Amino acid sequence: MTIKLGVPSKGRLMEKTFEWFAERGITLRRTGSEREYAGAVDGAEGVELVLLSAGEIPRELAAGRIHMGVTGSDLVRDKLADWETQVAELAPMGFGHADLIIAVPTCWADVDTLEDLDAAAHAFRAAHGFRLRIATKYHRLVREFLTREGVADYQLVDSQGATEGTVKNLTAEAIADITSSGETLRANHLKILSDGLIHQSQATLFAARAADWQGQEAALAALATQLGVAPPKL
Amino acid sequence: MASKAAARATGERYLAAFRAAGAVEIAPDILQPADALLDLYGEDIRARAYVTADPLRGEIMLRPDFTVPVVQEHMANGAEPARYCYLGEVFRKQDHRGASRVSEYNQVGYEVFDRADPEAADAEVFALIAGALAPLGLNATIGDIGILSAAVEGLDTIPERKAALARHIWRPQRFHKLMARYAGLVSAPETRAAVLAGGRADAPWIGMRAPAEMEERIARLTRDAEAAPIATADVARLDALFALRCPAIEAPARLRALDLPAIKAATERLERRLSALDKRGVDLSALTFDASHGRTTMEYYDGFVFTLSAADPALPPVASGGRYDALTRVLGQGREIPAVGGVIRPGLVADLEGLA
């Protein structure tokens, strides 16, 4: 039996994750050919590396098929209902920063806050006969945020990519998406609402509550000590 | 937890009682067209209802509640006055774990469409449901959204502000933020002044919302900026109203003491309702009046609201209901009829009977 550690399988997120573990004395590396998703772990006993798409890591954690995993805190909150009952947050890792925000066309001079968005949505619905559309792929996070803030008369429309283009393409009136520098928003003539920050995401190490931890307690405690994190209550 | 068969058998018992009270049984479809429900409730219902696709009918929902299909059936085929009852499953997605958070359960309900005497109809529905559940010793709470709407309508301010507040009675958080802004307790966002002074963004126009829609809103914002703030004494009176919670028998006197002339007629309606409840043998001293009852969960109720709950706060209400005149207006395409109804969750009743 080993502790299965799920890590993003490519790109900057993988490299930064490898660096983060290396700083704590654990070497993660890919093995085999460049195209083969296989990996090895040096410097920690009983840990197995599983390379996965970052987007699938929340699901794998929820199912308990991996014991630990690295993914964006936004993805866990959005994909897992009642996420704290499914995973434990072990450590924010200090990279992969991105803000989930609500943005509207820059030309809407009258809309700067959620209060404005709500009022504009109400008038829009009366004028157009349907609810103001907000394009996003983060349905749960956005809906919970807007419910908490008391915004009405909107609807979410699914957008899995190129979300910033939906307003110009007339398939949405506003968007909720992640941004780090805001450049893509500006290029598409969108502005962020001043109180429209939904979640500040970063790469985070999670432990799965549903995973089989039987007989792994000692290995987990040793790993936690090595990583400098408090051992989770699972 | 009680078995489905036990829940069903318990439901049949109440259905028989509702039939005996003069209701006609109806059986709305489990598969409901999604568009009417989505248009009414928006994202709240999408988060809670199971949506699926039908090859011919498009998006459909597993029935999340009976009220809408019952109103639609009445508007399409009903004679007046009408009393309906039903028993069947409703389906709700649950986002949190918990023993009582089940995603399919039975509801047995009783609905009255009658113009003659709304307060008498309110009392009829409540007394029938509370009477049927009397052996369980539940806590009963009533409220009246009509009193809150009347208080908002009576505010000394411009119509736009009243409309914005009335729209958010069901979203207390937004309501109180707006109130703070209209009372001048919170200032408008910094960018507002520039917009009112004629400032416009140096950006190409994109999207379906038209420039004229923006100018219309800026005109509204200008009227708002010119309007006097709502007096803080009025805000305090409204806050006192929202916070009022007392034995129902004391409610009319306590409401009068709030010094809100605008709620006079609504308070008289409450009094008529209480006296109708009294005539039906409801003990008014055991009934709680909560002015804010129904503000957070039940947007389509616009008058009388009630719930009957077990002592365990983790359990959802065993029964709930209220008046939804506005819903019949929305679904009636120009027609409307005063309507009031309520539902019992027989599965919870069976659980509680099992504990006794």
Image (cartoon, coloured by chain):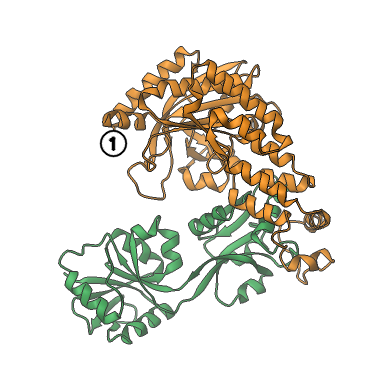
Chain colours: A green, B orange
Question: In x, y percent, where is residue B95?
Answer: 41, 50
x, y percentage for residue B244? 58, 40
Q: Is residue A173 left or right of residue B38?
A: right
User: Where on the picture, by quarter, is residue A206?
Assistant: bottom left
Question: Is residue B324 among what the camera can see?
Answer: no
Mark 1 Cα shell of 10 Å, populated few (<14), some (14-19), many (≥20): few
Q: Disc 1 residue type?
A: Met
The residue at the point 53 percent across, 71 percent down is A99
Q: Position of residue B121 (x, y in %)?
A: 58, 20
Q: Position of residue B122 (x, y in %)?
A: 57, 23
Pointer 1 indicates a residue of which chain?
A: B
As helix, strand or loop, the secondary structure at mark 1 comes to loop
Identity of the residue drawn at 68% across and 53% down:
B178
Image position of B339 with respect to A112: above or below = above
Circle 1 residue: B1
User: Which of the two residues, B110 or B45, is positioned nearer the viewer here?
Assistant: B110
| Frontmost residue, A116 versus B211 | A116
